[in-house]
Amino acid sequence: MTKIRLGIIGLGNMGTTHARNILAGKCPEIELAAIADINPERISWAKENLPGTVGLFDNADKMLGSGTIDSALVAVPHYDHPRYAIKCFERGLHVMVEKPAGVYTKQVRKMNEAAKLSNVAFGMMFNQRTHHIYRRMRELVRDGGLGRIRRTNWIITSWYRSQCYYDSGAWRATWAGEGGGVLLNQCPHNLDLWQWICGMPERVLARLHYGKWHDIEVEDDVTAYVEYESGASGVFVTGTGDAPGTNRFEITLDKGKIVAEGGKLYLWELDVPEPEFSRTNKSAFASPPCRFSEVETDGKSEQHVGVLNAFAAHILHGSPLIAGGEEGINSLTLSNAMHLSSWLGREIVLPYDEDLFYDELMKRVRTSRKKDNISAALQDTTGSYNT
């Protein structure tokens, strides 16, 4: 086999993006063999815009059982990510899942267990792990030269969305359709990078505001505080109502500080680690001397194409994935814990009660409102796949 035969489940915004990248020759070891979408408009679009060699299916099960594919990319609404991944595992198909891994960790845990039994490749579309800034940031933290982490702060409010964005689809920003707001839609990449670079915390305390800036029922403003087993602390602030927004990721360690902002990576490196300076310094108002520099990176950010190419190479040659599918549960654990902390009004210790989270989520799903007068503003790209 010189190419993997990929089928895309869900030809919405991301499914269409992946299809176009493959057809543009950006993924030389991938053949776009088929697509499946229950929306007749998306099938019509595919007939007009995709080559005749691409199989078109109005039902994912038909595509998965057609024998025309050996791998699948799951790009459907969030609740269905684990369900279709498990269907693929049961048929021995390799699987790439779009973010997030799912809506609640209980279902994602079942997906991960099914993946272990299947003996197929399983990847998550965490394309931001290919970004040169975050790769280098992780290297600086993980090589140990700057010592232990003391504090992490990420202000990521550059996800501004106006009301028309939320009015563009019946499933958007509803508990029943999407399962959450900014944490589940915009921030899975940030939450993944946060834990990929800094590790998972053990305690989470969060304050979420629901429909604070928009006419929606899910969160659009978040402030969370976490504590790590090491004693380090962290703050994560996000929302879709700030204009202009901020994207500043800062990590303070024993021997310096790293800041990612504005497409640059900056380093303040202490001449003497802070614990040693504090212990030996004899001047009451002195601070540890430090050196400032802009950190060089390789400048490469292969994004979605890089993740897909690594997926194909893993299947064909055994090379590493960008992100294993089982890792998707980590960022979802963080967002679930933030939601649960907000709902219960207290600190959440990890691991939390997954049944309790599910019960609390379903309370909100049962009262989730039905959207009327949906705008067609984004209908040419969002598609649908609700079964």
Image (cartoon, rainbow, N blue to C red):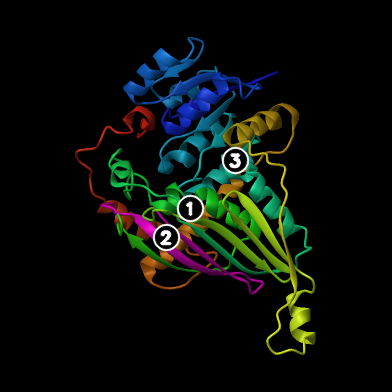
Q: Earlier in the sequence, mark 1 or mark 2?
A: 1
Q: What is the magenta range?
A: 214-239
Q: Secondary structure at mark 2?
A: helix
- The residue carrying pointer 1 sits among few (fewer than 14), some (14 to 19) or many (20 or more) residues within 10 Å by Cα, namely some
- Residue drawn at the location 64% of the way across and 71% of the way down: 229
- Residue drawn at the location 65% of the way across and 21% of the way down: 28
Q: Secondary structure at mark 3?
A: helix
Residue 323 in view (yes/no): no
Q: Position of residue 375 (x, y in %)?
A: 25, 36
Q: Nearer the viewer, residue 172 or 284?
A: 284
Q: Quadrant of residue 271?
A: bottom right
Q: Amino acid at mark 2?
A: Phe
Q: Which residue is mark 3?
A: 115
Q: Position of residue 7 (x, y in %)?
A: 52, 24
Q: Which residue is mark 2?
A: 357
Q: Earlier in the sequence, mark 2 or mark 3?
A: 3
Residue 31 in view (yes/no): yes
- Residue drawn at the location 38% of the way across and 63% of the way down: 208
> Which quarter of the image is occupied by the C terminus?
top left
Q: Is residue 306 above or below residue 213?
A: above
- Asked if the residues shown at circle 1 and circle 2 are in contact, with their CB atoms under 8 angstroms apart, the answer is yes
Q: Nearer the viewer, residue 108 or 308?
A: 308
List the single residue furthest toward the left: 373
Q: Amino acid at mark 1?
A: Lys
3D distance between C-alphas at marks 1 and 3? 15 Å
Q: Earlier in the sequence, mark 1 or mark 3?
A: 1
Q: What is the magenta segment's predominant secondary structure? A: strand
Q: Amino acid at mark 3?
A: Ala
- The residue carrying pointer 3 sits among few (fewer than 14), some (14 to 19) or many (20 or more) residues within 10 Å by Cα, namely many
Q: Position of residue 14 (x, y in %)?
A: 47, 33
Q: Which residue is mark 1?
A: 106
